[in-house]
Image (cartoon, rainbow, N blue to C red):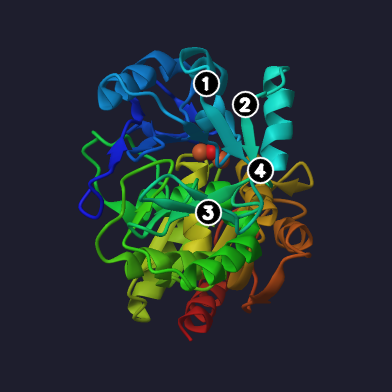
Amino acid sequence: MKNSKDIIYVGVNDHSIDLFEGYYKVPDGISYNSYIILDEKITVMDTVDEHFGEEWLNNIKTALNGRKPTYLVVQHMEPDHSANIITFLEAYPDAIVVSNQKAIKMMEQFFHTEIKNKLVVKDGDKLELGKHILNFVFAPMVHWPEVMFTYDSTDKILFSADAFGKFGALDSKDDEWDCEARRYYIGIVGKYGPQVQAVLKKAANLEIRSICPLHGPILEDDLKHYLKLYDIWSSYETESEGVAIFYDSVYGNTKKAVDFLSKKLEEEGCKKVVVNDLARTDMAEDIEDAFRYGKIVLASITYNGSVFPFMNEFLNGLVERNFQNKKIGLIENGSWAPMAARVIKDKLANCKNLAYVEPTVKILSSMNEGNKEQIVQLAKALKD
Ligand code: FEO
């Protein structure tokens, strides 16, 4: 690390995983980060996924070169970070687990054993390691209720648990942060914007030189960039200008309407038009795009008196994550009783601050001249 000589990375890369949390596609894998703080009282920050216990313990052994850790700080109990707590205590039986009461309770739920050597901390507590002083900053629901951040006030390092993490192993070729960090954030923490805002306010009072998350790279340069994105994402504001269109189409007729709209939006001068076929694009990427852009269009066929299954999954994904603050255009298609627009509005009924843009385009089987005129009007309305 540039900003600390005493912090050593001992995490691991997972390239064998297909679905992170059993849902998110991670073609570039993921890292489970863990760190050692070298001091009079050597401290290990978090463990790693269950499949990497041996590699992680070897990393620790190499880094410590015969020395023994005093503390294991547990910031988050989701198993991708906590699965090796008992393995660690077997290797280092004198080590003390430092965590909060909620996390200790979860340890007992996961491992069915009492953690005897423990130091239970409260929000705002400090722990002196020698030169380094750790300050515990509780961050409930970023991403589970027991989550806490740890601020090393000596080297000004923020250990941020899942926050500021991204998909992608550290040795993957993809080193662009924003896209995979956004997909990670919106997918996994997106529902908890108010809680992220609360912890960002606490962090605003700290001088931070580096951020050490539990996934993805250590952040050391241009921290304002990452903090600003987290502020936008957690306040559900528009990150990028443009229109994102999400559609499903069985025989291609709804797709033709979407392609026509896309062309008209470009003619209207829309700088960015994103078109996602919900049956074929990554659902987490679709959901990410819906949060990213301020204007979206939903185009669906009518299916079993509802919307098509991929649109249904997409809408559920939005609602679950507190979707809000959007302008929305609607295109529905049906050969005898089109009702997708009404179903979409019903499904989004509890989302805050959604403004539907007129006209709603109602296609009967395939686009006619009247529909084309409606789509031209919709493109004009979305431009403003
Ligand atoms: Fe990376 Fe919420 O676990």
Pointer 4 residue: 100
Dot 1, crowdedness within 10 Å: few (<14), some or many (≥20)?
A: few
Identify residue type, mark 4. Answer: Asn
Quick check: 334 above or below 13? Answer: below
At label 3, counting other C-alpha atoms closer than 10 Å, the crowd grade (few under 14, some 14-19, many 20 or more) is: many
Element type at marker 4? loop
Q: Which residue is mark 3?
A: 186
- Mark 2 element type: loop
For marks 4 and 3 on the same chain, the one whose residue lies earlier in the sequence: 4
Q: Is mark 2 within 8 Å of ligand 1?
A: no
Q: Return the disc, 4 or 2, that comes first in the chain's sequence.
A: 4
Residue 351 appears at what percent x and percent y?
72, 66
Taking 172 as reference, is 211 left or right? right
Which residue was labeled with disc 1? 94
- Snapshot quadrant of residue 124: bottom right
Among numbered discs 1 and 4, the one appearing first in the sequence: 1
Total residue callouts: 4
